[in-house]
């Protein structure tokens, strides 16, 4: 199979990197920068302000099935433009808020809509269309933008807030997002290689026709499909572990006697390995049995949690974080790869959208479960045992998943 010297699909990889970098960095990771200022300005408790992200998560879960079907049917550029507009308008209006309900409505609602229309579903749909043999590699590189956004944008947003105030910071976020995203959307977006006379992976011939069990997946229909459940129960426990282990790590480490700086270094090791794991596991998924690659990531997470059960100092905690981070970082691209391989290019957007509500409860319950267990036991160790059980469920589920491995991403008949 020959390929063109330069394949436009790599432009799509760069574009989706930027898309997720901006959307996730501003709409999710940067929220922590505003937690204390919003608490003080609105006269609310931190818990009340933090509920904004829970509302945002619910908005994403509820709207994702419809968004997936929309991306499968309508012009991608206009939907992405609508997402950029939602992000911009949401942040501009946030600069004028005076009440907690307005924060919920705008950051949880309008900015949440922007996340749905700019994040995981459109980015991975484009990548699934443009790549087959190198799909994992493309998704891993693209999703590195999600992780690195926290490293880059959180300090930038913090500096603007401290220098000019929270109102100006919101305005800068809104205008900055639009200034970066709108030109990129209209210059770079191409739904698939066939639209410009190319083929996936830069091939000189088209892929064989897909065998699939329908391109229009709804949440209700997904609930009756065993492979939707297999993927959801594979990824859900892993995502739940990310939400609780990483966010509880600073408290757990300081409870063991580490200083805040030592605890932050453990978190840094964990998140750094998580960032490296995205492209690493994406590449592995292109060259090895995908169920085996997913199982390896799950086992790395489980090994990290097992080490954390007995870790008592900075070195042992860092070792646990190293293993856990390496495992959890690969789950996001592997999730996208499994959906693409099982349900195919045509059905990818609607399938991912339909699966979002099945995954979201795991994300929502992770940190609250950890804090509830800690409040009742005085330790996070029982949380780690819960996650080990979850990893057994995940390993069982991925072993039951049916994938017709043909290197073209063709799904099995269902």
Image: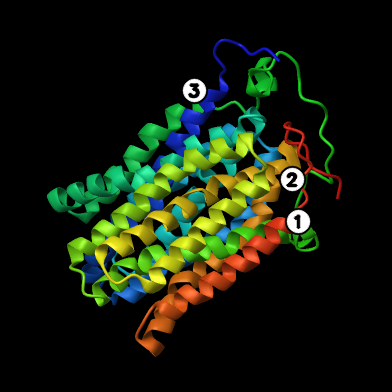
| Mark with earlier residue (2, 3) | 3
Which residue is labeled 1 in the image?
Answer: 227
Residue in front for this viewpoint, 39 or 312: 312
Q: In front: 94, or 49?
A: 49
Q: Is residue 125 left or right of 119 when viewed as pictured? A: right
Dot 3 corresponds to which residue? 187
Q: Earlier in the sequence, mark 3 or mark 1?
A: 3
Horizontal side of 395 relative to 277 (left or right) equals right
Crowding near pointer 1: few (<14 within 10 Å), some, many (20+)?
many
Dividing the picture into quadrants, the one containing residue 227 is bottom right
Mark 2 or mark 3, whichever is nearer to me: 2
Residue furthest left as drawn: 163
Query: Tags 3 and 1 in contact by the CB under 8 Å rule?
Result: no
According to the image, label 2 marks what residue? 342
Which mark is first along the chain, 1 or 2?
1
Marks 2 and 1, how far apart at CA: 8 Å
Residue in the image at 56% along x and 57% along y: 298
Q: CA distance from mark 3 to mark 1?
A: 37 Å
Q: Quadrant of residue 312?
A: bottom left
Foreground tag (3 vs 1):
1
Name the residue located 64 percent from the left edge and 38 percent from the top edge: 288
């Amino acid at each position: 199979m020959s390929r063109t010297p330069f394949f436009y699909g790599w432009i799509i990889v760069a574009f989706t990197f930027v898309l997720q970098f901006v959307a996730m960095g501003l709409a999710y990771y940067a929220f922590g920068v505003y937690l204390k200022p919003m608490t003080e300005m609105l006269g609310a408790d931190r818990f009340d302000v933090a509920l904004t992200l829970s509302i945002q998560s619910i908005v994403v879960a509820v709207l994702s099935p419809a968004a997936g079907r929309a991306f499968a049917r309508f012009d991608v550029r206009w939907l992405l433009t609508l997402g950029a507009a939602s992000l911009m308008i949401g942040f501009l209006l946030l600069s004028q808020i005076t009440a907690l309900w307005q924060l919920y409505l705008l950051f949880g609602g309008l900015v949440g809509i922007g996340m749905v229309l700019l994040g995981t579903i459109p980015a991975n749909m484009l990548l699934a269309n443009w790549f087959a043999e190198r799909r994992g590699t493309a998704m891993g590189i693209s999703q590195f933008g999600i992780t690195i956004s926290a490293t880059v944008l959180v300090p930038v947003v913090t500096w603007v807030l401290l220098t000019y105030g929270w109102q100006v910071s919101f305005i800068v976020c809104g205008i900055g997002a639009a200034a970066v995203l709108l030109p990129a959307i209209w210059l770079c977006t191409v739904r698939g290689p066939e639209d410009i006379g190319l083929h996936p992976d830069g091939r000189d011939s088209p892929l064989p026709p897909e065998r699939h069990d329908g391109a229009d997946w709804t949440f209700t229909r997904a609930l009756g499909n065993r492979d939707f459940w297999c993927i959801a129960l594979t990824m859900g426990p892993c995502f739940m572990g990310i939400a609780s282990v990483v966010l509880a790590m600073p408290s757990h480490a300081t409870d063991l006697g580490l200083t805040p700086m030592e605890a932050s270094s453990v978190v840094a090791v964990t998140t750094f390995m998580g960032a490296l794991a995205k492209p690493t596991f994406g590449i592995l998924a292109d060259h090895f049995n995908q169920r085996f690659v997913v199982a390896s990531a799950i086992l790395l997470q489980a090994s990290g949690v097992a080490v954390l059960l007995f870790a008592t100092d900075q070195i042992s905690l860092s070792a646990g974080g190293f293993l856990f981070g390496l495992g959890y970082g690969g789950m996001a691209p592997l999730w996208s790869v499994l959906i693409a391989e099982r349900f195919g290019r045509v059905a990818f957007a609607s399938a991912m959208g339909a699966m979002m509500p099945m995954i979201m409860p795991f994300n929502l319950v992770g940190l609250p479960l950890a804090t509830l267990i800690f409040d009742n036991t005085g330790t996070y160790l029982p949380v780690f045992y819960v996650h080990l059980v979850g990893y057994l469920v995940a390993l069982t589920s991925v072993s039951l998943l049916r994938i017709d491995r043909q290197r073209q991403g063709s799904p099995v008949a269902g």
